Structure formats: C-alpha cells, structure tokens
Amino acid sequence: MTTTSPLNEPELQRAKDLLDQMSVTQKLGQMHQVNGAGGVVTEQLAHDVRMGNVGSVINEVDAEVIAQLQSIAVNESPHGIPLLIGRDVIHGFKTVFPLPIGLASTWCDETIERSARLSAIEASAVGINWTFSPMIDVSRDPRWGRIAESFGEDPLLNARMGAAMVRGYQTEDPSQTTAIAACAKHFAAYGASESGRDYNTTNVSEHELRHVYLPPFKAACEAGVLSVMTSFSDLNGVPVSGNEWLLTDVLRHEWRFNGVVVSDWGSVQQLTVHGVAENDKAAAEQAINAGVEIEMVSGTFINHAEALLHSGVITIEKLDAAVLNILAMKIRLGLFEQHYLQGATSPYNSEEHTKEAYEAAVKSCVLLKNNGTSLPIACDQRIALLGPLADDGYEQLGTWVFDGDVSISQTVLDGFRQRRVEVNYLPVFASTRDHDNSRIPLACDAAAAADAVVLCLGEEAILSGEAHCRAELDLPGAQEELIRAVSRTLRGRNVPIILVVLAGRPLALECIEPFVDAILYAWHPGSMAGPAIADLVLGERTPSGKLPVSFVRKVGQIPLYYGQKPTGRPVTHDNYVHMDQFPMRAEQTSLGMAASHIDTHFTPMYPFGYGLSYTQFEYRNLQLSSHEVSATERLDVTVEVVNCGKIDADEVVQLYIRDKVSSVSRPVRELKGYQRISIPAGQSRLVSFSLSRADLGFYNQRSQYVVETGTFTLWIGGDSTCDLSAEFNWISQ
C-alpha cells in the first residue's frame, strides 16, 4: 500500500494544461536544477528563474532568499510554476539524529519515521521541499565511506527503514506545509562499488541485483516515494544515468513508478568521463532517453536538448512525459498553493525535537562487550574521561550535517557533568588522527587515580561519508597506543576500562578488544550524544541497539555478511584450520579445503543483529501454526521471550529462514522479520510473526519470481547466529 497516489483527474488535467502552454525551452527549464548562490539572489539566477529556465534549486537554505526565488517563479515567470528547493537533509536539519547506520541499529521503524518527520518539519520551515534521502544502498563493505549513510547489509532492513523514512518525510499528505519530498538513492547497487571506493564501477549479476540491491528501492516505490536518484557508478558497464534497462524497463515499466528521476550531482555530464558519451550533447541524449528527468547542476539538458529534439534523436513525447512527472510532483507537494514562506518560524531546538534525538541516540548505541559488571558504572565512581571525542559537539554529529547546529550539541563530558559525576577529562589528542603520543602518560596518571576509565575514541566525521573511503579500518592516529598504555597501567587493578566508539563505519576492533572491559559502539549519535551515552554508561538506560552490519576481524575478510551463499565447501567449526595448526611440509590438500581464510577465523568479530544488554533474554516455546503450509495459507510463528534479569529492557526479536533446496543457490540465512519489544524484569512476552508466500520466494534463472515447494528452516532469536529453530514444508495446493 502506498502513502501517496497518482494525481486525481482534476490535478492531472491541471498538469497537462500547464504542459500544453509551455515552450520547449520552458520544458527544459523544469528539467534543469541549479546550485544556489550561497545566501543571495544573483542577477543571473533571478533572470533564469524569471524566464522559466530553472525548475529546481539545490543547496539554498536562507529562508528569505528561498522566499524571494519562489516569489519570482510564481509571480514573474511565464506560467507561475513554483520551484523545487532541494537539500541533503540526511539525518536531521538543525537538530541532528544519529547517522543512518546508527538509526538502523535501533531496529525501530517508528524511530526512523519520527526522525524523518522532525527533520522535515525543521527543513520545511525555511522553504526546503525536497530532500535527497533516504539512501537505501545495501552496504557490505565498511571501507566505503557512504556506509555511514546506509541502513547496513540486509535488504529487508533497508527496505523497511527506507519506507519508514519516506513516510516520515512525506506523510500521508505531501501537500501539507511540513512535508517534503523524499528521494530514494542511489539507484542502484552503489553500495557494491569495487574496493569500497566511491564513484567506482559495480559489477553485479541480475540475480544479485534482484535479491539484494533492488528490493529496498521497490519498497520505497511502494511506499510512494516521490523521486529516485541515479547512482554515480556504472552498473555492469553501463553508467546508471544512461542505463535505460534500469531506469525505464525496471523502474517505470516493471514497478510502475510514477515519480521523478533525478541524476546525482553532475552524473549526466560524467557519462563523457565514463567513456560512453563523446561529448555533453551525447551525454544529454543518453540520459534523457534512459529516463533521467531532472539533471542536477551540470546543465547538459538545458544546453543541448533542444538541438537533440530538432535532430530527432530524442522525442517531444519523451520530454513531455518527463515534465509532466515534474509538474505532478510539484502539485502533489502543494507548491502551487504554498509556494513560499510568509514569516515562518523555525521549530528546531524545541524540547520535543531534542527529546526525540536523545531517544534515537540511546536506542542506536550497541553494547558489543561487557566483562562481568564493568557496565554500568555507579554514579559515585570517579571517572577518567579520555579521548578527543569526549567533548566535541561538532564531530559527534557525523557526516552530511551541512545545517546542524553545533550550539545545541551536548557532549559526553556535558552528559556526565549534568549527572553530577566526578570527572577528570583529558582530550589526550588534538584529533583522532593525531600521532602525538606525548600526552599519553598524563592520561595514564588520570586512569590510575580513577575508579573507572571511559575512552571516547573513534574517527572524526570527515573520515566517513562521500569520497571518504578507507583501506584500513583500525583506529587512526595513536588511539590504539593509548588503549594499550592505559591497560598496562591498570593491570591487576579492579578498574574497568570502557571504550566508547564514535565512528561513521564499522571498525576492526580485534586487536584492541582484549585491552578493554567493555565496548559501547555509539556511531556518530548526533546532537544529544552526551546525555545518551552518559545514561547508558551509568545505567540510567539499558543498551538495546543491534548491529545492522557484520563487524569484520580483519579488512581481508571483506565482504563478510551473514546472508552468504553456502558454496560447495562451506567452512564450519569442524573443518576450519588456522595456518598456525599446519604441520611443516603438510601436503597441499591435507587440511582445511573449505571456503575460509587460513590466517583469521571465518566468523565475524560481531555478527549481524548482535547487541548485548544489561539483562539476559531467553527464547522459549517456538510454535508454528503448521508444519505443512500450502500456497494459499500463511505461516504463523510465535515465540516466548523472557527477560531473565532484574532490569526492564528492550529486545529486538529477529526471524530468519533458509530454503534448504532450490533451483538457484540461496543464502544460508535471510532476515524475514523483526520486532523491537519492551519486557519488564522477570516477565515474558509472546511475539508473533506471519510469513506469506511472497516471503518465501526468489528469482529463478529466468529472473521470474517463484516460490518452490520444499523444506525451510526457521530461526528466531537475538541475532543472526541464533539457534532456536524449526522446520516446515511448503507444499503445492
């Protein structure tokens, strides 16, 4: 079911009437997006808007400038068509929520939708009506900088959270003043860029596309997303901004998408750099014929499309279809009725918004390790708070926060002080990349005088995000040296060392994990990072986040994700052999012979779906409505989840399946459902799932979606390695 629908008949007629009145040049103006002038209305920009040569503006956030531009468009341009005003509102506007990869760690669709709703309220207050979010690229390479913007490695998690963001941005009525258009990006398979490098080539079979990378975009379309953005990359040799199969055959014809397709920044012109277009004119031809309708910034459409039309290589029908979609989007957004601001007041920094940012931050933090009773720390303990990220209101916001207000950030140091905890704070380093170890002895002295040590380490915001890809995943600078030094200082003493990691990607923690007693992975948690982390460390709140992506032990394991194929020789605990176990001069085929690396364990450091709590949960009484399910039935699954501890807590219940025998190889496990639930101490909850025929299907060798009869295994538990299982048979009717 969609949250938006095609135009009704009067609205459609309105769009068609407008289209009939427009010249070719004015139509191309609607397909032309320009970059803002940085808080001013230049003579050139005003002229272009007045002449109808611009349909949308990106990166203008000054409310008065936006109002002036909209006034020119509505009152002075030939047909009074208002502008689309675009901005990257990725995980907040002024109030910043956790990074998307952090939001994904909440496993809470309601939190995702609420963060997008409040972001839209803040952004729309200055006149923004279009955001280039959500990014729903399935991401399985933590070296890729843009994994920070993603919802992780799983198609279902990306699909559900992407749809939740669409609902939050657009609401059920996109024409209301606080709604903004969402944009699903980057279509498609951008997360599969070779070597985890941005803008790089992607080679993905159609089989993998349909099972992994396309489902989140299909879900966004079904949720009524108003726009889709093309990927920078080429896909199997064809750059997406010129890929007719993807943009027209799949998106338009197969999925019946009725929104707008926009290129990424300059990606149409970059068809010439890819080497598939001889010049800008040829690039415009390819992109328009492929199905791109708004060109972001580079201007090949406005400069060359009229000549292409006269030469017959593009058709007026193609242009008209594109412009009709753009006009329809503006009508759906209600821009003709609410086209510019009249004294709007920005709602950010309200108690409601900061409270929601705090709740999202609490839910997003993942407890990866907790030896004994290392956490929580009692409020009367003296804490040595060490690290450059403990009191940096900017870096905790993370990547893609052009408009985030640092003045409302509350740091970890702020959080502890607000709770009146005795804190000795030392940043130790100037930044996370600092190699100067001269202040490490002072940090060790502070640790020696404390009852507990909290290390706030990780990577700065600039080290993740677009174009900020890394070949190594260790803690940069001298941070690891600090951890080891503090560990040596406290050896033999009952002083817990708590590592709080603030980062934009999953880091490889194997080499430093033995030197700390607890690890709280906080990602970049946003404006309210400090109170959230302090409350988790002090036990005022209980950690409940779960990993949306597997954490590798070593970079060489990449890609490592839970839903891998079994292969013909799967590695198991029984057949795995580490190279240190090889006897000298062993025969080549005498050991191992399984799909693994011989110099590290085959498992991840921390698996997908993993996250500890301050309590323990037990799963009991797994029940299936039937063990023989026909094509017309649904399979109902119930399980009892018990909170065995003394603390009220949240748990994320996860359901996985495996098709044991099928005509194409299927993953060893697939996530098919999840629920975030609250359970009081000592009590239990009965959790139910329902699986339909569609949940059990896959694309066969002919790219047809099928559900084959056979046996399935089903697991329910707290992460992707859960072992409570049952089997059922899918039978023909």
Image: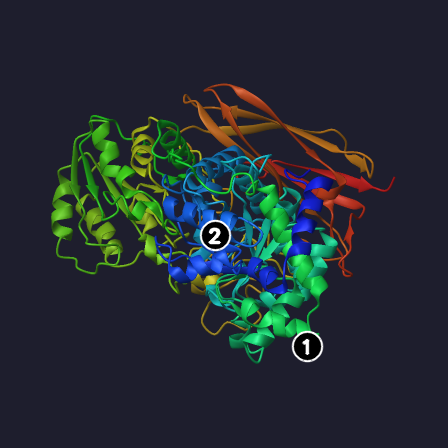
Residue 694 percent across, percent down from the top left: 74, 43
Disc 2 vs disc 1: Cβ atoms closer than 8 Å? no
At label 2, the amino acid type is: Pro
User: Would you identify the image quadrant in which residue 307 lies?
Assistant: bottom right
Residue 374 percent across, percent down from the top left: 30, 34
User: Viewed as shown, does residue 251 lie left or right of 603?
Assistant: right
Q: Which of marks 2 and 1 is nearer the N terminus?
A: 1
Q: Residue at x 64, y 73 (%)?
A: 308
Regarding mark 2 in the picture, which secondary structure is present there? loop
Numbered mark located on residue 311 in the image: 1
How many residues crowd mark 2 within 10 Å: few (<14), some (14–19), many (20+)?
many
Query: Mark 2 highlights which residue?
Result: 604
Residue 283 percent across, percent down from the top left: 58, 73
At label 1, the amino acid type is: Ser
Q: Which residue is drawn at 58% across and 46% down?
A: 330
User: Viewed as shown, does residue 358 lie left or right of 271?
Assistant: left
User: Viewed as shown, does residue 308 lie left or right of 267?
Assistant: right
Regarding mark 1 in the picture, which secondary structure is present there? helix
Q: Can residue 492 be seen in this view?
A: no
Q: Residue furthest bottom?
A: 278
